Image: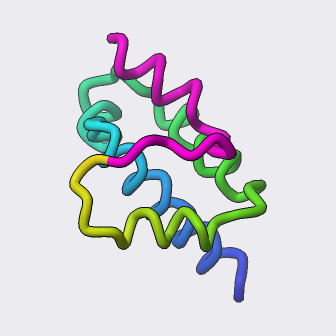
Amino acid sequence: MSYNLKRDAHTHLVLGMADRQGLDLQEMVLRADLSEDQFEQAVDRCLGCTQPDACKCLLDSALPQINLPDYCRNGDLFGDLRSK
């Protein structure tokens, strides 16, 4: 898989996992609650994850809200954003 395709896949994972946490990261970037650099760093952290397939399976579940897995490298970011 090319780097661009892999990055796109992880971007979707970050957006999907944030959405399941009640966070609309794209809207937060537009409102300047989250910088583009912070978003890109979140994707970079996701790229370093060893379990993206497990994350995809979680996101493919029918549940509208899911708990973050312990291995999520963006858990602290999502927690910080929820508290805003």
Q: What residue is at 53 percent from the left and 70 percent from the top? A: 8
Nearer to us in this view, 31 or 84: 84
Q: Is residue 9 above or below residue 77?
A: below
> Is residue 76 toward the left or the right of residue 22 in the image?
right
- Residue 6, image x and y in percent? 64, 75
Residue 41 visible within the image: no
- Residue 47, image x and y in percent? 70, 58
- Residue 42, image x and y in percent? 59, 42
How is the structure coloured here? rainbow
Q: What residue is at 62 percent from the left and 44 percent from the top? A: 72
Q: Quadrant of residue 74?
A: top right
Q: Is residue 84 above or below residue 77?
A: above
- Quarter of the image that includes the N terminus: bottom right
Q: What residue is at 50 percent from the left and 70 percent from the top? A: 56
Q: Is residue 80 above or below residue 47?
A: above
Residue extending farthest bottom:
1
Nearer to us in this view, 17 or 63: 63
Q: What residue is at 77 percent from the left and 55 percent from the top? A: 48
- Quarter of the image that includes the C terminus: top left
Residue extending farthest top:
84
Residue 77 magenta: yes
Q: Quadrant of residue 41?
A: top right
- The magenta region covers 66-84
- Residue 51, image x and y in percent? 70, 63
Residue 6 visible within the image: yes
Nearer to us in this view, 13 or 61: 61
